Amino acid sequence: MNNMNWLPVYPEILLLIMACVVALVDLFVKDERRTPTYWLTQVSLAAVAALHLSYFNRGETMYGVQGMVVTDPLGHLLGFFAAIAMIITLVYARPYVQSRDMLKGELFSLSLFTLLGISVMVSANNMLVIYLGLELMSLSLYALVALRRDHAVSTEAAMKYFVLGALASGFLLYGMSMMYGATGSLSIPKIFEVISSGQPNKAVLVFGVVFIVSGLAFKLGVVPFHMWVPDVYQGAPTAVTLLLGGAPKLAAFAITLRLLVDGMMGLAVDWQQMLLVLSVMSMLVGNLAAIAQTNLKRMLAYSTIAQMGFMLLGLASGVVNGTTLSAANAYSSSMFYVVTYVLTTLGTFGMIMILSRQGHEAENISDLAGLARRSPWLAGVMTIFMFSLAGVPPTAGFYAKLSVLQALVTTGSSFYIGIAVLAVVLSLIGAFYYLRIVKVMFFEEATDLAPLKPAGDVRAVMALNGAAVLGFGLLPGGLMALCAEAIVKALAT
């Protein structure tokens, strides 16, 4: 290891510099549309995405900053997807925030700081670095939720998110302190070595794992640590809701993998059982609660809880009967799942912002009534997104669910096969509220006859988004191979 090698953190350095530059440039921007700030932010994000992609193509694993940071294909692939997700989010968000007097420099600089926190998290090789990235991302998101200061609901959502987020950080930090007390190190590879040696006190280790899993569950928004998700999703401005539900999910997956798989594989028997309980409870509560919702954003919040529960199934099936033969397959299926979920979520909330207008929030399911008559094209794209979330072929969501179920079944364990059957049943229940939205769009009379004229860039990105969700369902092999390559190289280090 080169102790002072700064090469692995070039994407983070670039993000930090550009976030500061954007904040300074915006002080001199008088254009109400914030065009210079917007394009400077987008160029910065594109440069970061290109840098991550070039690192990924090199396929190397390097360590830097005294071994606290690792640059490997896993981190750079997730960093690339996170940067792309942020680019798409800002394209969808710009017309929405402009009509609500939220198009300010703070939105762009905080978005860059959010991505900086995500980048730090996905490349962390030390528990303190993970915590640093987590807090940077979380504090930026707290401020973004409260960006609409004159809106009482948004302010309330920000307070709830801040209080419960602080609780989650406390859980995670206390669990890390327990792991440090048991192993004598905060370095993830060192923790792995100490646990593998069998020397530490097992009771203390398991106690630490419980707190770490609880903190991760808060960030993923799974049951029983889900109470903040529906309120924050509903209360936050839709553009910020998309910021919450998009790229940060990739970061939550990354730190779950770094902490539990890279650092605590020797305790897999313990944390896999916890993840299975969280997963089943999330799919059950999320799907059943979503059926009763009339608010579209709240329904999608419960949908997120169920989707994250399904993703955890892959992470919980990597080690079976003490063997790790199926680990790469299981973890890559979860990674594929979270990437396709984020891609679908971007389009779904982007559609909600298209349907919203000055003085009106398209937050209720009834606001989608008659969309097929108002805009058959938008209704068709929204149908693709709903089919993907429901797991209907030939969308990306179908193959994502299939890959996770395949990972469960190939373990050969009757217990995991039973969990797979239960997951299918709960997914069928969940399909009801997704297909209900399709029914409302095509078979109910329109309650709003206002014309829908999204901006040209929004239409283009929405078309590409819908095509990607459909394309990764028809031809999933390329993305699945990238995920598998990243996971295999991460496990090999």
Image (spheres, rainbow, N blue to C red):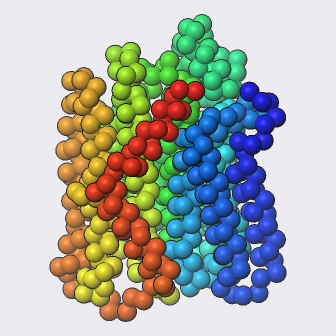
Name the quarter where the C terminus is drawn.
Answer: top right
Where is residue 155, by image quadrant? Answer: bottom right
234 vs 402, left or right, is: right
Task: Please provide percent x and percent y for residue 133.
Answer: 67, 45
Q: Total label count? A: 0
Where is residue 9, by image quadrant? Answer: top right
Residue at the limit of the structure toward the front, as seen here:
58
Where is residue 115, by image quadrant? Answer: bottom right
Asked if one can make out residue 169 in the rendered structure from this viewpoint, the answer is no
Asked if one can make out residue 393 in the rendered structure from this viewpoint, the answer is yes
Q: In this view, does 63 lie above or below 346?
A: above
- Residue at 34% of width from left, 48% of height from top? 477
182 vs 482, left or right, is: right
143 vs 425, left or right, is: right
Residue at the limit of the structure toward the top, as seen here:
199
Q: Is residue 156 above or below residue 58?
A: below
Q: In this view, does 210 lie above or below 371?
A: above
- Residue at 29% of width from left, 66% of height from top? 384
238 vs 36, left or right, is: left
- Residue at 50% of width from left, 43% of height from top? 253
Q: Which of 320 and 211 is in front in this view?
A: 320
Name the quarter where the N terminus is drawn.
Answer: top right
Task: Please provide percent x and percent y for residue 433.
Answer: 25, 62
Task: Please provide percent x and percent y for residue 90.
Answer: 57, 71
- Residue at 62% of width from left, 34% of height from top? 61
Q: Nearer the viewer, residue 488 or 89?
A: 488
Task: Please provide percent x and percent y for residue 431.
Answer: 23, 57
